[in-house]
Amino acid sequence: MSIVKQNDQRAYNFNAGPSALPLTVLEKAQQELVNFKGTGMSIMELSHRSPAYENVHNEAISRLRKLFSISNDYEVLFLQGGASLQFSAIPINFLQPGQKAGYIMTGVWAEKAIAEAKLFGEPYEIASTKEEQYRRIPGLNELNFNSDDAYVHLTSNNTIYGTQWNDFPDTGDVPLIGDMSSDIMSKAIDVSKFGMIYAGAQKNLGPSGVTLVIIRKDLLEKANPNIPTMLNYQTHVKANSLYNTPPTFGIYMLGEVLRWIEQSGGLAAIEENNIEKAKLIYDVIDQSNGFFAGHAEAESRSLMNITFRLADEELEKKFLAEAKNEGFVGLNGHRSVGGCRASTYNAVPYEACKALSEFMKQFQNKHS
């Protein structure tokens, strides 16, 4: 069995995060690493108050607004602490005494988010598919929330279970908050449906260390002002995300990834490519007569994380070992559930997904 790698030195990177970055972005960063735009310094050495860095910072925000069609009704922030810090920041800002907040339970990250909210108020589960091993996204008809809730929270893509929202609920006057860490910028969405969107950068936007927050101005006006400075969104709005030293290199890389998305044809082209990549692998699963078994129900399948099992753990170990020998990285399922997972984020090339689909077919032929 022999699969020709895309490059003698580049692995087929299916890591769930930190994950693949566009090769052209990495090469540009390499070229600019020591002397950024004639400054005689690396971007990592520049003051975050310098004009050279501020141009990088503001250009990244501008590209993001354009690509994601973010109106002036929203603020765009670059924060730190990952999505996990937002699990606390959201309720401490918006879950006022006497209010409730609804959480839609679709996996581990939703569980972590509601656990943090319980430290600050009264969150409750709007719907859950936990008893079904999180194989699907709840239907819109299953979502019953209160008209006076502080907010409704969902996780748009579930990395561990391989499920993804196709249609988002209309929550009316109740702000909808979305954790989009693992599928942000993988397709165009209607940002206006959301009061807030947040995402760790390390899957589709850049390296780890940057957290994107898109937040509607009228929601900001309702935030509790009497909270720690660094958890207060207004702190960062007023300072253009420069209240303290930001992750400057990560923001530079994020801006370059956004440039790459533009040069790739924008979000419509990115989505089309993501659909084609995922289809390569799902088709093998569906046509394997049960040799490979997908975890997610078909209508809830993720384009970002393809989760599957083989007949038994010994066969899975063989699959993962042989895949590693062929240059495939990151195909182990999450430690909490086991199995296999191929994360096909934006920067994972079509060729890598094609190679994986061919490897899967060859492996089945060898071990059937």
Image (cartoon, rainbow, N blue to C red):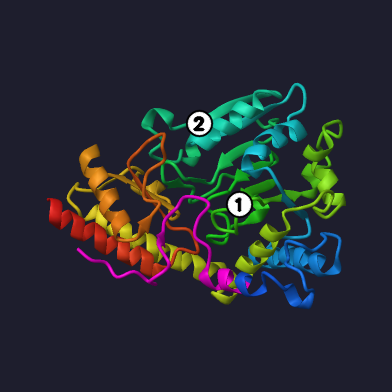
Left or right, 236 with respect to 263, comes to: right
Q: Quadrant of residue 43?
A: bottom right
- Residue closest to the eye, 101 or 343: 343
Crowd rating for badge 2 (residues with CA inside 10 Å; few <14, some 14–19, many 20+): some
Secondary structure, magenta segment, majority class = loop
Q: Quadrant of residue 60?
A: bottom right
Q: Position of residue 148 (x, y in %)?
A: 70, 30
* Region of the chain picked out in magenta, as a range: 1-28
- Residue closest to the eye, 68 or 204: 204
Which tag is nearer the camera, tag 1 or tag 2? 1
In this rendering, is residue 23 above or below 187? below
Residue 11 magenta-drawn? yes
Residue at 32% across, 58% down? 281
- Residue closest to the eye, 81 or 189: 81
Q: Is residue 143 visible?
A: no
Mark 2 belongs to which amino acid? Ala
Left or right, 73 with respect to 209, comes to: right
Q: Position of residue 107 (x, y in %)?
A: 48, 36
Quadrant containing the N terminus in the rendered view: bottom left
Look at mark 1 in the image and give the residue it sits on.
208
- The reply to whether callout 1 and callout 2 are in contact (CB within 8 Å) is no
Residue at 80% across, 49% down? 217
User: What whole-number distance in Å separates the C-alpha atoms at marks 1 and 2?
Assistant: 31 Å
Left or right, 235 with respect to 159, comes to: right
Residue 153 magenta-drawn? no
Q: Secondary structure at mark 1?
A: loop
Crowd rating for badge 1 (residues with CA inside 10 Å; few <14, some 14–19, many 20+): many
Mark 1 belongs to which amino acid? Ser
Look at mark 2 in the image and give the residue it sits on.
127
Q: Position of residue 26 (x, y in %)?
A: 57, 68
